[in-house]
Amino acid sequence: MLECIQSASFGDSGRLDDEGFGGDPSVNLLEKLAAELTGKERAILLPSGTMGNHVSLLTHCSPGDLVLVDTTQHLYRKEKAAFDSRFGQLEPLFYHLTEDGYPDTAEIERLLEQKKPKLLCIENTHNHAGGTYIPFSVLDELRKLADKAGIPIHLDGARLFNAAIASGIEVSTICGFTDTVMFCISKGIGAPVGSLLCGTKEFIAEAAVTRKLLGGSMRQAGVFAAMGHYALTHHIADIAADHRRARLALDNLKDLQCARVPDKIQSNILCIDISGSGLTAEQYVRALKEKGVWLSESDETHVRMVLYRDITDAQVMEAVKIIKEFDRRMKQPESAGLQNHAG
Ligand SMILES: *Cc1c(COP(=O)(O)O)cnc(C)c1O
């Protein structure tokens, strides 16, 4: 990946020609590959997934517009600026996920009949739901509902390739159900920086203007675009191993006493319910970090383990050992207390 930068050419990717391409050949190569993979006409490079989602929402919508988002969706819960009264001024119209972690189409249908949202946002795989993918039949249903209402669909595909591998649905097929898609190359794909927003030629030309307004136009971005291109041409298939390692962790954490793992997981995220531990998610994460295992908070009662290409089977098993040991020690004071009480 480092070697490919040495032979890459750079330029000003913010200055677009009549065809809508910028002046950085390495960025153009990456954008063409992203468009090809997603089956869209064009793609545009952005420094982060957050900016990619924001450029998309602010290009699709105007201040005051209603936008369908699920209550736990990253672009609402974590990013927010598109809905902030100081910034995007969009209005969320909430739908929920089913127990299986994908959009509740019956609820969306009802909301579309009652209100007039301008955009439907979905997330695939779904971060907060524990890396769940949206099944083909649900993607198809969502497309039909959006078409009936005459509104576009934006896909937050930060983990688009995880969704494709977990579901067995081609990336371009998933994206074929949506008008625009943002995906990250800086997560499981393993590039250092960057996200791509893909859509029609007209949409991406407008998105380039929004990107400029948000400060996302970049000079010499080829430095990291070249690495992103390398990652996208070499790393996609490896994502299956991340899913296997997440299952390895799951299979070995089934007998925790003070925390609970789900019966099944679909991709690279293992969401652990720690409500039985007596600790907040923040405390749990901090305690394990001190022991060398980096988890992250999902909400007050759940922590996440996210697998990616730098983590080996041996490291998964080492983490499992540390978590189990921590779990056992937490269990002890309680049983000691019971004994005292009884004695
Ligand atoms: C990480 C993430 C983003 C945002 O990407 P950044 O590059 O961190 O800004 C958006 N959506 C989802 C689902 C994510 O997991």
Image: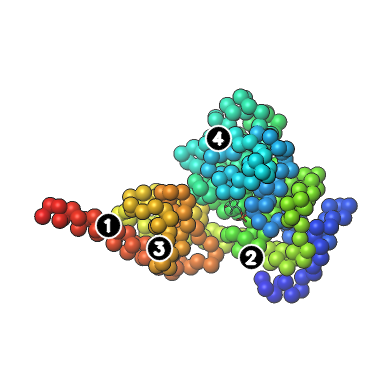
The answer to whether the residue labelled 4 contacts the one labelled 2, judged by CB atoms less than 8 Å apart, is no
Q: Earlier in the sequence, mark 4 or mark 3?
A: 4
Residue 161 in picture, x, y percent from top left: 60, 54
Q: Residue furthest front?
A: 86
> Callout 3: helix, strand or loop?
helix
The answer to whether the residue labelled 1 contacts the one labelled 3, judged by CB atoms less than 8 Å apart, is no
- The residue beneath circle 2 is 192
Q: Please give left or right for residue 273 compared with residue 328 in the image.
A: right
Q: Tell me the amino acid under the disc marked 4.
A: Tyr
Q: Residue furthest top?
A: 114
Discs 3/2, front: 3
Q: CA distance from mark 1 to mark 2?
A: 40 Å
Q: CA distance from mark 4 to mark 3?
A: 34 Å
Kindly tell me whether residue 29 is visible in this rendering: no
Identify the residue at image location x=50%, y=58%.
306
Q: CA distance from mark 3 to mark 2?
A: 26 Å
> Callout 1: helix, strand or loop?
helix
Residue 142 in picture, x, y percent from top left: 61, 35
> Callout 2: helix, strand or loop?
loop
Q: Is residue 314 above or below residue 63?
A: below
Numbered mark located on residue 331 in the image: 1
